[in-house]
Amino acid sequence: MPEAGADAVLQARGLTKHFGAVVASRDVTLDLRAGEIHALIGPNGAGKSTLIAQITGELAPDAGRVWLEGRDVTGLGTVARARAGLGRTFQISALMMEATVLQNAVLGALGRRGTAFGGLLRPVLGDPELRGQAETALADVGLADHAGIVASELSHGQRRQLEVAVALTLQPRAFLMDEPMAGLGADGTRALTSLLDGLRARAPILLVEHDMDAVFALADRISVLVSGAVIASGTVDEVRRNPEVRRAYLGEERAP
Ligand code: ADP
Ligand code: MG
């Protein structure tokens, strides 16, 4: 077991990743605790997405380990980690745009069974268990009334909500989200902020986000990444007051 609080659902320990001469992650250690939204912020190129990719299993770290609920998942691929409870959204939209909202959610629920989707949607949609899980997830994100709509007809904000629903069908133990607010207007941002706010009680969220209003509204803790290294980690107030953070990232004009 790694050294950490018993309430840490997800633990990254000493993650290090080089791309040629670039050190994208420098000995990064952080925890995601039960019930929290832990925001990961930093300038472009700081290594946020690279860090998330090592936690999801998309990228293998050069050094370091990842633990989920006390289990070392470092050697597992993305699919096994998803089944182990790592819920991921937003980096690449996994939605099927020609399928309905309900069909997208049912396919998400199917992933939990570990059976590959063979391409016949009809028998899958008729499966009461999968359908029930999908409908529950859609209700959870506020899309129950849109179940029959084709995904391409949803607004950007509703698509993000659907992505959360798809992730929810796998009953994740922890969420990883890379810039969920990107490209959303004020309404979409508000709706997604409210959704994430409620989601933390189900599973904690490691949230990479550029929208600082959303970060300050949602985050229980913030870690700041600069040039691959965590330069500060703490509560919103602690991080806002941190002089190094102000210099490196937030800018004095954003200071309270
Ligand atoms: P962020 O998400 O914080 O903007 P990234 O994790 O995307 O930062 O990138 C961190 C650094 O690693 C950058 O210098 C980027 O150019 C580099 N990088 C990211 N992915 C690759 C890759 N696949 N190959 C080479 N360099 C990469
Ligand atoms: Mg990124």
Image (cartoon, grey):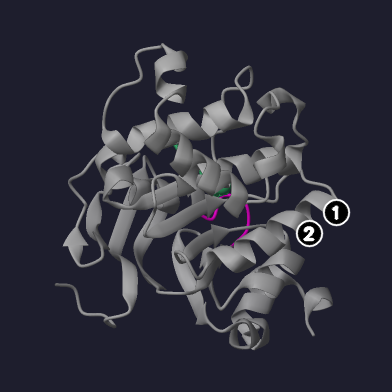
- Which disc is residue 186 wearing? 1
- Which disc is residue 248 wearing? none
Kindly identify which residue carries mark 2: 190
Q: Say what amino acid the circle numbered 1 marks.
A: Ala
- Report the magenta residues as a range: 42-47
Q: Are marks 1 and 2 in contact (CB under 8 Å)?
A: yes
Q: Secondary structure at mark 1?
A: helix
Left or right position of 28 against 166: left
Percent position of residue 197, x then y:
63, 67
202 or 180: nearer the eye? 202
Badge 2 residue CB within 8 Å of ligand 2: no
92 or 225: nearer the eye? 92
Badge 2: how crowded within 10 Å, few (<14), some, or many (20+)?
Answer: some
Distance from Cα at disc 1 to Cα at disc 2: 6 Å
Work out whether 251 lies above or below 99: below
Most prominent secondary structure in the magenta stretch?
loop
Q: Looking at the rendering, in which quadrant would you find the N terminus?
A: bottom left
Work out whether 181 lies above or below 5: above
Q: Residue at x 65, y 34 (%)?
A: 147
Magenta-span inclusion, residue 211:
no
Left or right position of 3 against 121: left
Percent position of residue 160, x then y:
65, 43
Badge 1: how crowded within 10 Å, few (<14), some, or many (20+)?
Answer: few
Q: Secondary structure at mark 2?
A: helix
Work out whether 10 lies above or below 85: below
Q: Say what amino acid the circle numbered 2 marks.
A: Arg
